[in-house]
């Protein structure tokens, strides 16, 4: 087992049981969880315990694996890009599946439901060697947060976010994504975000 999954951040029962007896594998996995060799993250999803793991699991990679299809967005992605100063204790994602909060020994993971029509604007990023995650692009992460927040389009809320490193926010992406969403709230939000960006760039309004 260590040879097969030692370099993975996490793995599924079915991956480990490929070509093997599934019921026997499940029985052995339960034993390894009880004796501390494995960590059960969710039904059918496991990670190796220290000192057996060869890599430290990346939280964003775990987030994708816990609930597919999903991508990291909202506060977690904004903080990761350095667009907001706050540290986010839970990994926040959006999914086309049902909303859910998953508590694991490796952290807390929160998922917001979004329609398939808005499930785009993300990219796969290599977090560390052989660990990847789907993460919202900066503009989409911000628009996702505003979409889920009552009054998120208002200047007062945008100022409360204390947006920083505004050069990472592409105004072209913001406008294009808002127009693609066909959401009037996001279109209003982009107008206010552009004013904040222009002010940060020293452009006279």
Image (cartoon, rainbow, N blue to C red):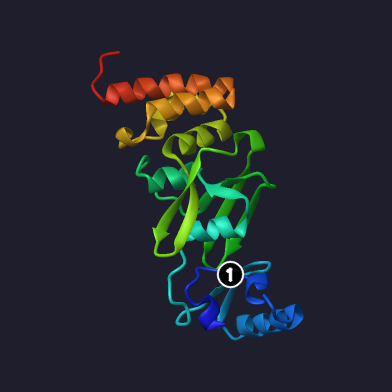
Q: Is residue 189 above or below residue 18?
A: above
| Residue farthest toward the top in the current orientation of the protein | 205
Q: Is residue 101 above or below residue 170?
A: below
The quadrant the N terminus occupies is bottom right
**Horizontal arrangement in the rendering, residue 34 relative to residue 138 (left or right):** right
Residue at the (59%, 86%) spot, across then down: 35
Number of numbered discs? 1
**Horizontal arrangement in the rendering, residue 183 relative to residue 90 (left or right):** right
Q: Which percent across, then down, holds residue 50?
A: 46, 79
Residue at the (40%, 50%) spot, across then down: 87
The residue closer to the viewer here, 75 or 134, is 134
Q: Which percent across, then down, holds residue 73?
A: 50, 44
Res. 108 in view: no
Q: Is residue 112 above or below residue 166?
A: below
**The image quarter in which residue 168 lies:** top left
Residue receiving disc 1: 11
């Amino acid at each position: 087992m260590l040879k097969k999954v030692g370099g993975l951040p996490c793995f599924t029962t079915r991956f480990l049981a490929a070509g093997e007896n599934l019921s026997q594998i499940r029985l052995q996995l339960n034993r390894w969880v009880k004796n501390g060799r494995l960590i059960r993250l969710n039904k059918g999803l496991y990670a190796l315990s220290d000192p057996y793991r060869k890599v430290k699991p990346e939280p964003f990679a775990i987030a994708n694996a816990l609930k597919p299809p999903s991508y990291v967005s909202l506060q977690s992605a904004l903080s990761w890009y350095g667009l907001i100063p706050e540290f986010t204790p839970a990994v926040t994602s959006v999914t086309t599946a049902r909303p859910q909060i998953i508590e694991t020994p490796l952290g807390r993971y929160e998922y917001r439901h979004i329609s398939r029509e808005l499930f785009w604007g993300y990219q796969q990023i290599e977090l560390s060697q052989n660990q990847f995650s789907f993460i919202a692009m900066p503009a989409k992460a911000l628009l996702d947060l505003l979409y889920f927040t009552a009054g998120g389009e208002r200047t007062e809320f945008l100022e409360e976010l204390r947006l920083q490193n505004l050069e990472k926010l592409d105004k072209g992406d913001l406008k294009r994504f808002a127009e693609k969403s066909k959401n009037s709230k996001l279109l209003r939000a982009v107008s206010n975000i552009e004013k904040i960006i222009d002010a940060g760039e020293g452009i006279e309004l």
